[in-house]
Amino acid sequence: MRLNAFRNGPAILPAMAFCGALAMAALAPQPAVAQETPASSDQIWQSFKGDVFGDKALAEDDGLVAIEAPKRAEDAALVPITVSIDAARAPQGIKALTLIVDVNPSPVAATFTIGKDAGITRLATRLRVNDYSYLRAIAETPDGKLHMSKVFIKASGGCSAPAVKNMTEAMKTMGQMKLRQFAATDTGGAEPELQLMIRHPNNSGLQRDPLTQYYIPAHFIDTLKISQGERLLLTMEGGISISEDPNLRFDYTPKGAGVIKAEASDTKGKNFEESWPLETTGM
């Protein structure tokens, strides 16, 4: 799996070392924001892309995949992104999608494995972005070819931003799931859409407890599987760059009347599961 392999690679800063670096940096005079440039972001990408994809060639901006994000983040801890696949250029669909934030301490935000007949052509979620950076979407087609799209965003401090909600309350609701189903007639697309929301603090390991000022240990959803009946729609292998309360929306091709089921686990070994009847009205 790309994300696990990359966690052990040389390009990742160990959490304790990174936190120590932050503490030392806080003592030294420096600009308030270390603003990366497109060139420096690309340089960082070149330093680790081999750890993720080996020596495979990446076709860039060939129209098969596109990523959208705001030019400047309103909240660097909750950056909305949308990835689209051109079905005409990928008639067999895609088998994997990887999201990367070049400058984040752990750049691989998530890798999605797509079900063979899931029909997914659009996927949206929210990311943490630590500094000015390219956001990249790399789609892999069934023939093993890689296609990349990127967008530059101005953001700062997303990985260390304080948790949005009270931590005690977050622990009480952790693992609760909500699913929204949208008919194609409501979205204006060719297929219906699903939106899954999971209550989870998704702590990055770089945030401080507001009372003790100690770093809060990393604790996040690292695996997710969504299926319809016995048919896989997608799986996600996630990291610290997925925002608090993971939120995932995507289109899909429903088949039969099988229920929608979501199964998730986090880095502390907690498992969460929920299922919902398929809503067929307007599909």
Image (tube, rainbow, N blue to C red):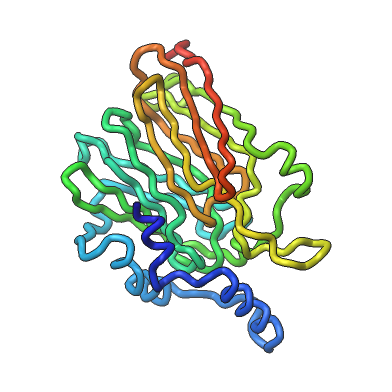
| Residue at far bottom of view | 29
Horizontal and vertical percent position of residue 179: 55, 27
Q: Is residue 4 above or below residue 259?
A: below
Which residue is the extreme one toward the front? 269
- Classify 225 as above or below 274: below
Residue 67 visible: yes
Q: Is residue 205 left or right of residue 258?
A: right
Residue 68, image x, y percentages: 43, 50
Residue at 59% over, 62% down: 159
Residue 208 percent across, percent down from the top left: 72, 64
- At which x and y percent is residue 108? 43, 58
Instruction: Classify the position of the C terminus by image quarter.
Output: top left
Which residue is farthest right? 211
Residue nearest the observer in this picture, 215 or 148: 215
Q: Is residue 235 above or below residue 49?
A: above
| Marker count (numbered) | 0
Q: Is residue 96 above or below residue 280?
A: below
| Residue shown at the point (45%, 61%) measured from the top left | 101
Residue at the image position 51 percent from the left and 23 percent from the top: 181
Is residue 74 visible to us here?
A: no
Task: Describe residue 208's horizontal placement relative to residue 90 as left or right.
Answer: right
Of the pair 218 and 60, the residue shown nearer to us: 218
In the picture, residue 6 is in which quadrant? bottom left
Picture residue at 55% right of the left edge, 40% below the top: 247
Q: Is residue 262 left or right of residue 56?
A: right
